[in-house]
Amino acid sequence: MSEKKMAVMYGAGGIGRGFLGQLFYLSGYDTVFIDAKEQLAAEINRCGQYPIYITNGDRYEPFIVSNVSAVAASRTSDVAKKISEAYVMATAVGANYLKHIASDIIAGLRMRMVRDAEPLNIIICENIIDADVYLRTIVCEQLNEAEKAWCQKNVGFVEASIGRMIPAVPEHIKTVEPLAVCVEPYSTLPVNKKAIVGETPDIYNLLPSEPFQLYVRRKLYMHYMSHAITAYLGAIYNYKYIYEASGDFGIRFVTLGALTEASNALAREFRIDNYTLLQYSFDLLSRFDNRLLGDTIARVGRDTARKLSADDRICGLIRLCHKNSVTPHYVMIGLAAALHFNCEGDESSREVYEFTRSNGVRAALAHYSGITDPAICERTERLYNMLGKAPLLDLINLPD
């Protein structure tokens, strides 16, 4: 084994190779990927490195990640051994797959316990609320009392907020370099500072944060919300790509207004200055302009029923605004636009679209979002009826 510290990355997909793998390399670690795809693991071992293509305007900037190896997940004893030797570990396997890797983690932790190894922090990069609680629970329920006590003191289950966008790799790159990953330049990794056990891992661009819920909410109510609103308004004006919609002055103005409302609500909720949140807003809009991300309106807007649920990106933000005495005028424009969204092949969005046409905006808001507030319903209904018929900037100035 190398004298360098070792990082174990469970999951060698887009986030694993395209985000954590790069940060581990920049931090000077040897990185061992664990993945269920044996062919992928074999290719990583054959090459010992892989390229990342950073999207920058209209060109790709190549970056080589080296000092990497891999172990197929089926080789459970080898996986456990690597976990037992790691300085830091991360997961990016998909929320539904976490339960399948728990036994490997447990085996590795038991080996660490026997030799009284230094604490291990597991950075959990999964798109699930309270991913740290979930993984800790499914691991600890299989431990005896002594092992649980040791785990409590020596293992950090550290939730991360993943904001980096990972677009599909173009065929002309994939054909020549099958391990290639395309990424956007943004590479900050906020993690829950309170969950870290022992020393904070020395990882490039790691941002230990407290209160971490601010970053969880920021991702949902700023990044996901503004992305969705850009898509829903973009669909009304017949754009295909997010970068096209983002370049439309009216759509950008509405999206920035919604981000400002979100910034004000979050700042009041967490009792912080909203300066950094407003900075984040402008940064997000510039990231949406990245044409090489190739993000389509259809992909970002799909599954409207889920995205309009009570605690999700748009309606959850409206509730947060209401709680903190912020009027969500711009967010409601996005809400009205979402009810118009009807993407071919997306049954969820078609259902919302048809339900709204048949039963009306107020019934749709109550059914999908649990919103019955008369003022919100009345304004959203007016906006819904005007979208696509009046200039977008007229909706901004719609009187109460």
Image (spheres, rainbow, N blue to C red):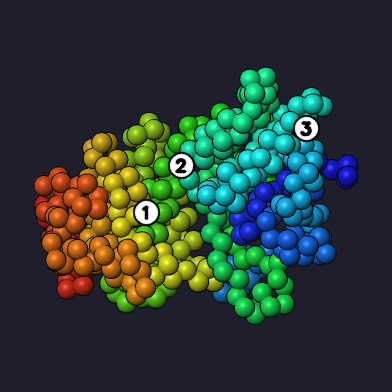
Give the numbered dot on residue 129: 2
- Sequence-wise first label, 1 or 2: 2
Q: Amino acid at mark 3?
A: Met
Q: Is residue 362 left or right of residue 232?
A: left
Whether 307 is drawn above or below 323: the answer is: below
Q: Residues within 10 Å of mark 3 (few under 14, many from 20)?
A: some
Q: Which numbered disc, 1 or 3, marks the residue closer to the eye?
A: 3
Residue 170 seen by the camera: yes
* Residue under numbered circle 1: 225
Q: From mark 1 to mark 3, how far is it between C-alphas?
A: 43 Å
**Tag 1's secondary structure?**
helix
Left or right placement of residue 132 versus residue 348 in this view? right
What residue lies at 79% left-to-right and 55% top-to-bottom? 69
Residue 121 lies left or right of residue 366; in this view the side is right
Closer to the camera in the image, 84 or 250: 84
Q: Residues within 10 Å of mark 2 (few under 14, many from 20)?
A: few
151 lies above or below 223: above
Residue designated by label 3? 111
Kind of residue at badge 2? Ile
Q: Residue at x 78, y 32 (%)?
A: 111
Instruction: Identify the disc placed on residue 26.
Output: none
Name which residue lies at 13% across and 61% down: 360
Q: Going from the N terminus, do you reach mark 2 or mark 3 first?
A: 3
Horizontally, residue 305 falls left or right of residue 34, namely left
Quadrant of image for the N terminus = top right
Q: Where is residue 31 drawn, in percent x and y?
A: 76, 50
Nearer to us of marks 1 and 2 is 2
Say what amino acid the circle numbered 1 marks: Met
Spatial distance from mark 1 to mark 2, Cα to Cα? 16 Å
Q: Is residue 58 above or below residue 186?
A: below
